[in-house]
Amino acid sequence: MALIVQKYGGTSMGSPERIRNVAQRVARFRDAGHQVVVVVSAMSGETNRLIALAKEIQAHPDPRELDVVISTGEQVTIGLLSMALKEAGVDAKSYTGAQVRILTDDIFNKARILDIESANLRRDLDAGKVIVVAGFQGVDAAGNITTLGRGGSDTTGVALAAALSADECQIYTDVDGVYTTDPRIVPEARKLDTITFEEMLEMASLGSKVLQIRSVEFAGKYKVKLRVLSSFQDEGEGTLITVEESKKMEEPIISGIAFNRDEAKLTMQGVPDRPGIAYQILGPVADANIDVDMIIQNVGHDGTTDFSFTVNRSEFEKAKAVLEGVRQHIGAREIVGDNKVCKVSAVGVGMRSHPGVASKMFRVLAEEGINIRMISTSEIKISVVLDEKYLELAVRVLHRAFDLDQPKA
Amino acid sequence: MALIVQKYGGTSMGSPERIRNVAQRVARFRDAGHQVVVVVSAMSGETNRLIALAKEIQAHPDPRELDVVISTGEQVTIGLLSMALKEAGVDAKSYTGAQVRILTDDIFNKARILDIESANLRRDLDAGKVIVVAGFQGVDAAGNITTLGRGGSDTTGVALAAALSADECQIYTDVDGVYTTDPRIVPEARKLDTITFEEMLEMASLGSKVLQIRSVEFAGKYKVKLRVLSSFQDEGEGTLITVEESKKMEEPIISGIAFNRDEAKLTMQGVPDRPGIAYQILGPVADANIDVDMIIQNVGHDGTTDFSFTVNRSEFEKAKAVLEGVRQHIGAREIVGDNKVCKVSAVGVGMRSHPGVASKMFRVLAEEGINIRMISTSEIKISVVLDEKYLELAVRVLHRAFDLDQPKA
């Protein structure tokens, strides 16, 4: 008997018919003798509908009240799935984030989980119940309803798995695993049987969109065995996200090509080159709750330097306004930006032991006449910022160049 | 400075535009120096939509999980109205039933309020905030979400007014007050300036549908000054529901003609006429959570009697099944029923001091050839059960016969 946490996304909960299918799957795990905790998202489209409703009232909805409104999406699906389970003969009980007591900080719309009370859940599990928990939501210490931000249900699933010391956390989604890249762009993309947490982190943050990045961090930190599976297929082992690197001799150097379409880049030119300047620029950006992705500062000359970073395209104007205030304060020359860029990355733990990956990547792009606008590297990935129009071409040629379309030996 | 509780129904919350209108009205009361607590229903149609969704999953939804699902309707509107108030420059804060801690019993779908914690609300009121509370919902002692049944938002409003010792509880609805009868059936129906709690109780329970009956009981018990107003008119004093009878000389004998279309009647024939038999019949009906309305038992003969009662039409089949079990147990002869009946009642505290109201009512109906199927009377009302087809005719002729279409002196 194992304790399994299963997380189902909005597509899996998208209709009464699909909810019944999820109940059937959960019932099979229960019948096989497992204890099951299910974490669900809102029905697909519901969170967006609620946000749109809020914006009809207030262009920038009050953050506390927005969480009150949008947390209802998951509250509906926990009730519906519990009903479907009972209808399938499985004793089930729903829990909102507040009822579990998923304690978070008080940053509305982007809260972080601080603690989870597991005593009630354990008692119900031991009594033979399937537990259905609302993803994406919690409460702060004052009892206010909070939400975890987009994709937060994945984080709820992993955090619950950690709190309950579950044997596995299964993330059911509309893909059957993690691919070498997006099959819509490269039909030859292959499913990976395993991927390391580190690689998955790079893939997720770079836009592979299979899992929310925080959930992967969480899983790595608390050693939660995490598996991505399709909720529309009964067969298949999905992709297991592992702590250890694969030891196979034939391990490919690169595990996948990730990309992000919705990027914007900002450069502050003529920044006085003195200690603490990076903090002076990025501090106000962080204070404005803008997530910064790539950060690049080149060596300066003439006592000044250029400082660049990328943000999500939706935060381009906001970031630009913040930077303008900073520019005047620190006496930099000019802000230039471009919100028509994308990021493409080659990811793989293999590149640690294989030099030459970066130069190969640059050569392949050059051969296609694609101009590289920014470069950033880490231990296990190389990212380039390109004009958005080159995205598909770049992904395809890199996928082929690193032999990702070849079946494994 | 007064403390006012205002309750807005689903029609008043039916669109972003209407929610803004409610915010404007609340803002005017605030600007006039009052403290305001607002209780809201779900957007019109939302509760029915959620129930339909639940029934797609489970024909008879699990009661606990149904409350989890349907309580989201009010959670959405408290958030939206708080946003609208902030947008109108009024500091506001939303509370779910659980956040207030509106403690109820654990009868899901039909819970009763046991206690309300008012300390947090008072602190926020004293800090100058408008409080927006979700109607219709509470929590039981174990922290499960409960709902109060149809119209429960009125009860929430009155219970909050009582707990906070509010100066007035204003129920905003789509009518501008309580009428002598339904103007859709009798165009000459007039609005009443005042009505006593007792009359209102009879009017409400008989189907006038302006206020939920429990809210009126509550208001009477805790001496809450209750007023029914239109949320679509800025003028008008509505109808004040008073503890005392009007002292006016010209007081009419009858205040209004109430009716209920959705009735069903059940008769158990040949019931052994012995002590405790009424309890033996109605105990199981109450245990099945079926609300019984009129109860009639006539004098028996040959050691048996006939026992009749009415229920809401939607509970006819369920009640019949319960009765069949009882019949076999107590050895009664037969169950007969009719679910095509209606109830029409003349209500008025004036009839206490004016004999002959009943005989006048029966005469008027006889003159129209309307057969009376059951009769029941109280201190301040006379109810008759009729074939449903006579409803409109009976209401019209009684309204005229008791001079309700005449302007007051």
Image (tube, coloured by chain):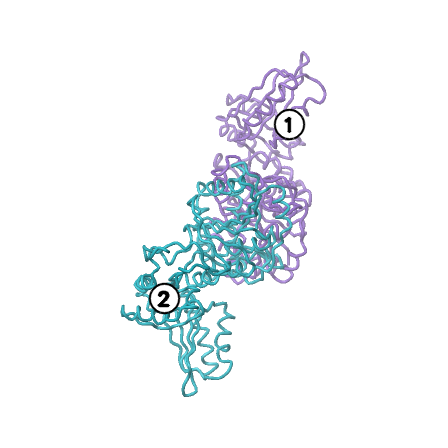
Chain colours: A purple, B cyan
The residue that disc 2 covers is B342
Whether residue A307 appears in this view of the structure is yes
Closer-to-camera residue (B189/A220): B189
Q: CA distance from mark 2 to mark 1?
A: 69 Å
The quadrant of the picture occupied by the N terminus of chain B is top right
The quadrant of the picture occupied by the C terminus of chain B is bottom left
Reply above or below: B213 against B237.
below
Query: How far from the left and from the top, in percent, is residue B90?
Result: 55, 38
Closer-to-camera residue (A1/B347): B347
Three-letter amino acid code at the position of disc 1: Pro
Question: Helix or strand or loop: what does disc 2 sit on?
Answer: strand
Reply above or below: A120 against A63.
below
Closer-to-camera residue (A179/A56): A56
How many residues crowd around disc 1 within 10 Å: few (fewer than 14), some, or many (20 or more)? some
Three-letter amino acid code at the position of disc 2: Cys
| For residue B54, side relative to residue A359 (left or right) | left
- Residue extending farthest right: A275
Residue B312: mark: none
Chain under callout 1: A
Query: How far from the left and from the top, in percent, is residue B345?
Result: 38, 66
- Residue extending farthest top: A302
Query: How far from the left and from the top, in percent, is residue A386?
Result: 54, 25
Query: How far from the left and from the top, in percent, is residue B180?
Result: 38, 58
Chain under callout 2: B
Whether residue A225 appears in this view of the structure is no
How many residues crowd around disc 2 within 10 Å: few (fewer than 14), some, or many (20 or more)? many
The residue that disc 1 covers is A284
Displayed quadrant of residue B386: bottom left
Question: Helix or strand or loop: what does disc 1 sit on?
Answer: helix
The reply to whether callout 2 and callout 1 are in contact (CB within 8 Å) is no
Reply above or below: A210 against A82.
above
